[in-house]
Amino acid sequence: MKDTGGAMAARIHRLEIRAELSDLVARYGYVLDARDWDGVVSCFAQDGALAFEGGSVAGHAALRDFYAERVGAYEFTFHYPHSHVFEITDDHLNATGIVSAHAEHGLDGACLLAGVYYHDDYVHEDGRWRIARREIRSRYFLPWRPGSHALPSSPDSGR
């Protein structure tokens, strides 16, 4: 069966969206770790929102203040996105996604490790993809102890 170009163009467009969303997720972590608050805010839509345990903020000014205060309190951060799954709407101007990630946070000379999921809504705004809403769901936030290589046993660990 010969492709008349329409199906191929649609597949290429979906791949372009996937690459742009992956770039957005990577850029968010990079500018966050660089303490580039304007760069962080530029990852969000004009009325973008962030939800987290205990609250939420919306709009660029509130997002900038939130990140500068909350993340700025750490001596360093290092965010690592892992898997990223998403669904694109039929109009190709909105999408939803889930990002699994972990991050390192420096506080009082110690390193804390966090495992999170970001539940995202994306919107294509001003010619690029942005986060319309991001909800952070924490899986763990634990101190890193060098030399502590013992893993807890669990039914799934095989130990």
Image (tube, rainbow, N blue to C red):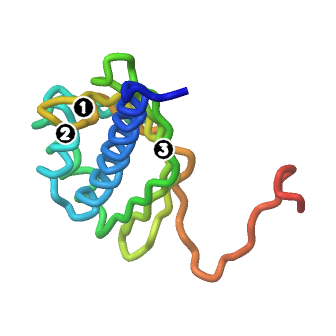
Secondary structure state at the residue bearing disc 1? strand
- For disc 1, the marked residue is 57
- For disc 2, the marked residue is 63
> Whole-Å distance between the Cαs marked 3 and 2?
23 Å
Image: 71 above or below 122: below
Image: 33 above or below 97: below
Secondary structure state at the residue bearing disc 3? strand
Q: Position of residue 14 (x, y in %)?
A: 39, 34
Q: Nearer the viewer, residue 135 or 44?
A: 44
Q: Nearer the viewer, residue 46 or 107?
A: 46
Q: What residue type is labelled 2?
A: Leu
Say whether marks 1 and 2 touch (CB < 8 Å). Answer: yes
Residue pictured at 44% horizontal, 33% vertical: 97
Query: Could you say which quadrant of the image residue 36 lies in?
Result: bottom left
Q: Position of residue 131 (x, y in %)?
A: 28, 35
> Whole-Å distance between the Cαs marked 3 and 1?
23 Å
Q: Which of 33 and 9 is in front in this view?
A: 9
Picture disc at residue 84? 3
Residue pictured at 47% horizontal, 43% vertical: 99
Q: Which amino acid does label 3 sit on?
A: His
Q: Residue furthest top?
A: 90
